[in-house]
Image: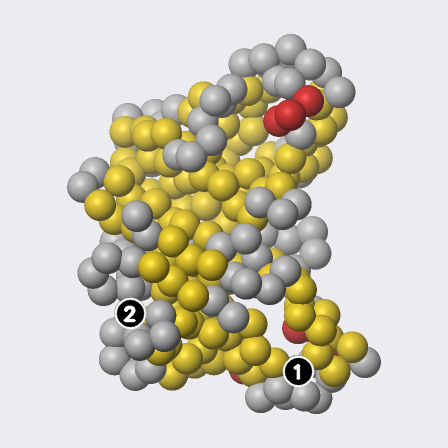
Amino acid sequence: EAQVTQNPRYLITVTGKKLTVTCSQNMNHEYMSWYRQDPGLGLRQIYYSMNVEVTDKGDVPEGYKVSRKEKRNFPLILESPSPNQTSLYFCASSTRGLHTEAFFGQGTRLTVV
Amino acid sequence: AQSVAQPEDQVNVAEGNPLTVKCTYSVSGNPYLFWYVQYPNRGLQFLLKYITGDNLVKGSYGFEAEFNKSQTSFHLKKPSALVSDSALYFCAVRDYMNRDDKIIFGKGTRLHILP
């Protein structure tokens, strides 16, 4: 089954404790992206990757890191989480191109206390 | 820069009535427009897209969308609403300029279908 898998689904952590949210897709997609969803703000792009070893900043990259060592995986790293990073996070993947739709993971609800 | 706007935060419709969720866009070049739906505790799911051709696009779950170039709109519609259609709906445009490849979302419209 074609899918994007994120882990964990829920995470509560303390300020400053490094964490990684994993994202994996099984569709051989070149494009992968991370978004955060906050009430009233919709989805905002954090980072995206157009292929292996190619990553670019989205609209809200501060406080986040990503890597793309393999085509299927695109982890999101918070080196020193802060409470303002409490949010719902989504990973997405697609083929390249203007006309292609994205596939989304189930989401990770992160709370930083 | 490309953008989409969803002017309504929330739309309430009685079950069985037609529904419309509005979206307007601002793009340079040809617009490639999408609708996604988010059910509670789930990720976004693709509903339909406009690439070119017919202005009325049909998608999943009985939804359709009408592309109107003169009004720069891409409204989502369904002839008869179901309670199970209650969800958060996002309009989106894909922006591919130079090296960038971004999907830009509207802020979302929460649809409530009243029994």
**Crowding near the residue tagged with mark 2, few <14, some 14–19, many ≥20 C-alpha atoms within 10 Å:** some
Q: Is residue A16 above or below residue A6?
A: above
The part of the image, by quadrant, that contains residue B72 is bottom left
B99 left or right of A64? left
Residue A76, percent from left and from top: 50, 27
Which residue is nearer to you in this view: A40 or A35? A40
- At 25% across and 80% down in the image, what residue appears? B53
The residue nearer to you, when weighing B23 against A5, is: B23
B30 versus B12 height, above or below: above
Q: Label 2 vs label 1: CA separation?
A: 26 Å
Secondary element at image label 1: loop
For mark 1, what is the residue? B81
Q: Can residue A96 be seen in this view?
A: no
Is B81 situated above or below A75?
Answer: below
Residue farthest along the right direction in this orientation? B115
Q: Is residue B38 left or right of residue A25?
A: right
For the image shown, how many numbered marks are present on the structure? 2
What's the residue at 45%, 77% (across, down)? B65
Percent coordinates x, y for residue B105 in the rendering: 46, 52
Residue B51: assigned label: 2
| Type of amino acid under label 2 | Ile
Judged left or right of residue A14, residue B55 is left
